[in-house]
Amino acid sequence: MRSIKLLIVVLSCIIVSSCIPHKDTVYLQNKGNATNDTIPYNLSEVQKPYRVQIDDILNIRIKVLDQKNVQIFNPIGDGNLNASSAERAYFDGFTVDVHGNIRIPTLGELNVLGYTTFEIEDKIKKQLLDEQFKETSNIFVTVKLAGLRYTTNGEITNPGTITLFKERVNIFEAIANAGDIPVTGNKKEVMIIRQYPQGQKIHSLDLTDINVMKSPYYYIQPNDIIYVKPLRQKSIGTGETAVSSLSTIATVVSLITSGILIFSRL
């Protein structure tokens, strides 16, 4: 009888420890010392201008009064009408090589590594005015990234590489497009592996804290890798909720009891 009581106590402890706490599954919690649940609305989003990296693809368009004079710069874009948007962006865009350069017709190589898209627009416009056009041509240059490509991995519903055709994508949008983080994913330590000229750096975000919106890594950048760790409960293999844990434990208790009865009769 005493051993059965001890078994019940042990199993109860396992149930409590194996369940995933509710606070570990909820995004954007107000973790301050506030006396109510009011979420502050004065959170400032931090996003530094993105600077072009190696392997980025740039979409460049040049417009003047007489468009025939700039046809060589602007891709026709109908080489393969059945291609996806990402594929057409790849073939029509200008890829930054390992030296940080892009090759533009008649202008030659232009170094863009570490520049913002606005700075690249100014560089192209200045070179065109110096070499081929006059101020009266009213040159208008636009430079955009040909999609924001990132990779998700780890404890996430649909891991893989995704390309979004937006200029700003925050961490929640990025994860939502990958199918969200399941209950067994660690939302408190979402890792962002980011490329820098000096190499890669790893940053950690707590998505359960509303102050994540203040983080300089709240907005993802092209070529980011988002890695979600599994919770300890996933590694152990216990249930995600009290009900699933209880079901598992009931099965174990049933097997142990059956074993005891069988051996006691021998």
Image (cartoon, helix red, strand yellow):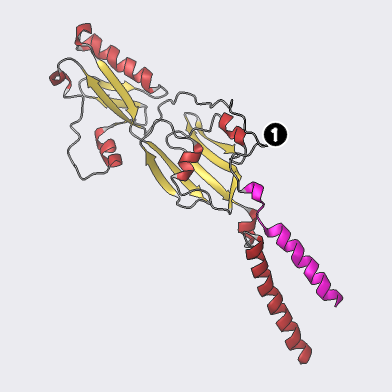
Q: Which residues are magenta?
A: 1-24
Q: Position of residue 45 (x, y in %)?
A: 53, 27
Q: Position of residue 189 (x, y in %)?
A: 60, 43
- Dominant secondary structure of the residues highlighted in magenta in the image: helix
Q: Position of residue 204 (x, y in %)?
A: 59, 38
Task: Determine whether, in the image, residue 24 is placed left or right of residue 57.
Answer: right
Task: Determine whether, in the image, residue 253 is placed left or right of residue 75.
Answer: right
Q: Position of residue 217 (x, y in %)?
A: 53, 32
The correct choice, above or below, for 18 with respect to 103 in the image is below
Screen quadrant of the N terminus: bottom right
Dividing the picture into quadrants, the one containing residue 5 is bottom right
**Residue 128 lies within the magenta run:** no
Total numbered labels placed on residues in the image:
1
The correct choice, above or below, for 185 with respect to 86 in the image is below
Q: Look at mark 1 in the image and give the residue it sits on.
A: 32
Q: Residue at position x 67%, y 61% from top?
A: 242
Q: Residue at position x 83%, y 75% from top?
A: 3
Farthest residue, direction bottom: 266
Farthest residue, direction right: 2
Judge the density around disc 1: few (<14), some (14-19), many (≥20) Cα neighbours within 10 Å.
few
Mark 1 residue type: Gly
Front one among 24 and 217: 24
Dividing the picture into quadrants, the one containing residue 51 is top left
The correct choice, above or below, for 29 with respect to 229 in the image is above
**Residue 13 lies within the magenta run:** yes
